[in-house]
Image: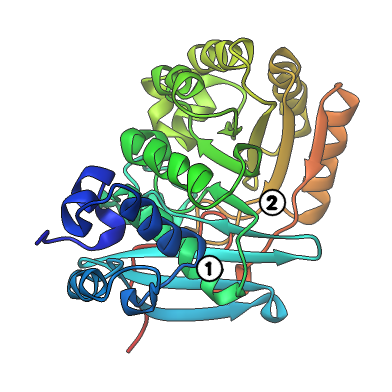
């Protein structure tokens, strides 16, 4: 018997557990991903002996240790214990859709100073099954299939490339979530961006830019010292040329750091080069006095300056700040006892 739960098994490992015929693997996958079933004994189209064998293994590896609800019930954050590491997942409900923000790592090694996750340090990589399980937890809460998944939780997705690609394939093939409804957010790792265009169906790519020049971005996004803006722009251009969907540029506004309207034309120039849309949002408080949110009027002025410079720009709506579930607020901390 394997020493890991069903969601962490690949097809060959699962075949060893369920035995012949080969379609048993597809049956189990359907129960796990479409029905989001947590009790193998309910997998009624399987022989009783197989059900008991699966029940002895268990389904998932995440143990929910805390659930927080905000925005009048429209946002839910789960804190999961993943073999000793805390992983956070956020569900956001809108009138026309439900979006799950998943973590790809426990913590983050990128070290961005305005982000609580980056300042909390790195724990470990998540396995593909642990990423998908976050979506299944949200689906069980909703009582229906999740429509959209964004890799914008804890961690840098492209730094856990193999597991993220596997998770995307599972979400697409087994959970019925179209690639156009999956977004991967990255600080920009050029070789991994190019690989994505070969390894997964065309999805949405979001680039966390946050500064239009290398000197400032070195401060806000430390990996920029290794992968400067021009190299990321070149990789994103290759992504587009290979059939990738439109790129979104994420720009978090930090008071007195990167919110001067004079920076907007430079951001707009990058956006025009990539035919990208710019999403702006004021940073969310993380407790670091050096980095605080830009005032609302400054944010509006910056968005206006982007538009005047020829960029398609949107002021993104903030969700989950009342439960520390907003962008940059997910942290490797356990809830108070």
Residue bearing the label numbered 2 = 294
240 or 115: nearer the viewer:
240
Can you tell which mark lies on residue 222? Answer: none
87 or 129: nearer the viewer:
129
Is 299 above or below relative to 158?
below
Give SS at disc 1. helix
At 60% from the left edge and 33% from the top edge, which residue is drawn?
203
Is any atom of residue 107 visible in this view?
A: no
Label 2, residues with CA under 10 Å away: few <14, some 14-19, many ≥20:
many
Label 1, residues with CA under 10 Å away: few <14, some 14-19, many ≥20:
many
Counting residues from the start of the chain, the first of labels 2 and 1 encountered is 1
Between disc 2 and disc 1, the foreground one is: 1
Q: Residue furthest right?
A: 308
Residue 249 screen position, x and y as percent: 65, 32
Is 106 above or below relative to 45?
above
Is 260 above or below relative to 20?
above
Looking at the rendered image, the quarter that the N terminus falls into is bottom left
Residue 100 screen position, x and y as percent: 57, 58
Residue 216 screen position, x and y as percent: 53, 28
At 57% from the left edge and 49% from the top edge, which residue is drawn?
176
Q: In the visual, does 230 lie left or right of 303?
A: left
Is 268 above or below relative to 116?
above
Residue bearing the label numbered 1 = 138
Residue 22 screen position, x and y as percent: 29, 47
At 54% from the left edge and 10% from the top edge, which residue is drawn?
234
At 36% from the left edge and 20% from the top edge, which residue is drawn?
226
């Amino acid at each position: 018997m394997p020493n890991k739960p069903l969601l962490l098994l690949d097809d060959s490992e699962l075949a060893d557990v369920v035995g012949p015929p080969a379609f048993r693997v597809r049956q189990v996958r359907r129960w796990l991903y479409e029905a989001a079933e947590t009790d193998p004994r309910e997998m009624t189209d399987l022989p009783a002996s197989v059900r008991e064998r699966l029940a002895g293994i268990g389904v998932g590896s995440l143990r929910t240790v805390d659930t927080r609800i905000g925005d009048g019930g429209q946002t839910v954050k789960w804190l999961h214990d993943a073999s000793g590491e805390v992983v956070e997942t956020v569900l956001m409900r809108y009138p026309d859709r439900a979006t799950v923000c998943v973590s790809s790592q426990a913590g983050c090694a990128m070290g961005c100073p305005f982000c609580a996750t980056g300042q909390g340090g790195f724990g470990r990589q998540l396995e593909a099954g642990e990423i998908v399980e976050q979506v299944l937890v949200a689906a069980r809460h909703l009582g229906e299939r999740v429509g959209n998944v964004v890799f914008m939780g804890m961690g840098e997705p492209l730094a856990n490339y193999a597991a993220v690609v596997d998770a995307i394939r599972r979400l697409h093939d087994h959970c019925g979530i179209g690639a156009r409804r999956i977004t991967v957010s990255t600080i920009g790792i050029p070789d991994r961006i190019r690989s994505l265009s070969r390894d997964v169906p065309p999805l949405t790519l979001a680039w966390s830019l946050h500064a239009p020049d290398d000197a400032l971005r070195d401060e806000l996004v430390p990996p920029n010292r290794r992968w400067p803006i021009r190299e990321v722009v070149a990789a994103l251009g290759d992504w587009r040329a290979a059939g990738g969907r439109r790129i979104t540029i994420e720009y978090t506004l930090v008071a007195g750091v990167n919110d001067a309207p004079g920076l907007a034309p430079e951001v707009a120039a990058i956006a025009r080069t990539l035919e990208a849309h710019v999403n702006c949002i004021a940073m969310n408080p993380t407790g670091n006095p050096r980095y605080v949110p830009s005032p609302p009027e400054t944010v509006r002025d910056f968005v206006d300056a982007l538009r005047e410079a020829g960029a398609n720009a949107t002021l993104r709506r903030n969700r989950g700040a009342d439960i520390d579930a907003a962008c940059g607020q997910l942290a490797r901390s356990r809830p108070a006892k």
